[in-house]
Amino acid sequence: MSALSHCLTEVMEKSGLSQTDWAQRCQIHATLLSRYRTGKIRPDTSGLERLLQGAPKEYQAQLLASYLKDDVPQDYAHLVLVSITSGKIQEDPAPYEFNELNRKTQKAFMHLIRLAVKDTDAQAAVQSTARYLGCKI
């Protein structure tokens, strides 16, 4: 499942809107929205724009970030960080030397990041570990 399809499904559930309601808000057919949700097809930029226009404002940045994440090849995802701050997508302000870590450690961090994106328990575990190691978060 793509990041966008996962995000779209999650956001639709959180918003409480039905698929039909979302499709009407986005001015697209409900079948097309279903295909976006299942990852069978990926919206082009005009389809993305319709999704964003129809989405409640509080979910627009999350949807856009997930769309951008899908553009990065998996083997190079460790080179790019897409983050959401105050509804804006920005580069990570804190420099880090991810490339200097060995490949095994990079993969471990990427696995933790993917888990934390999907699971609040994983987020809590990562934050707890960071606090234990002295990170002020």
Image: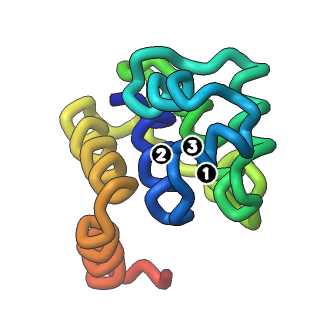
Q: Residue at x 46, y 23 (%)?
A: 35
| Left or right for 118, reference 79 | left
Q: In the rendered view, how is the structure colored?
A: rainbow
Q: Position of residue 37 (x, y in %)?
A: 44, 33
Q: Quadrant of residue 23?
A: top right
Amino acid identity at mark 1: Gln
Q: Quadrant of residue 20?
A: top right
Tag 1's secondary structure? helix
Seen in the picture, residue 50 relative to 112 is either above or below; the reply is above
Evaluate if marks 1 and 3 touch, with contact meaning CB atoms under 8 Å apart.
no
Q: What residue is shown with label 1?
A: 62
Seen in the picture, residue 6 relative to 94 is either above or below; the reply is above
Q: Which mark is residue 7?
A: 2
Q: Label 2 neighbourhood size at 10 Å, few (<14), some (14-19), many (20+)?
A: many
Whether residue 96 appears in this view of the structure is yes
Q: Residue at x 29, y 69 (%)?
A: 126
| Left or right for 26, reference 133 | right
Evaluate if marks 2 and 1 touch, with contact meaning CB atoms under 8 Å apart.
yes
Tag 3's secondary structure? helix
Q: What residue is shown with label 3?
A: 20
Amino acid identity at mark 2: Cys
Q: Position of residue 10 (x, y in %)?
A: 43, 53
* Mark nearer the N terminus (3 vs 2): 2
* Mark nearer the N terminus (1 vs 3): 3
Q: Nearer the viewer, residue 54 or 106?
A: 54
Q: Label 3 neighbourhood size at 10 Å, few (<14), some (14-19), many (20+)?
A: some
Q: Nearer the viewer, residue 45 or 107?
A: 45
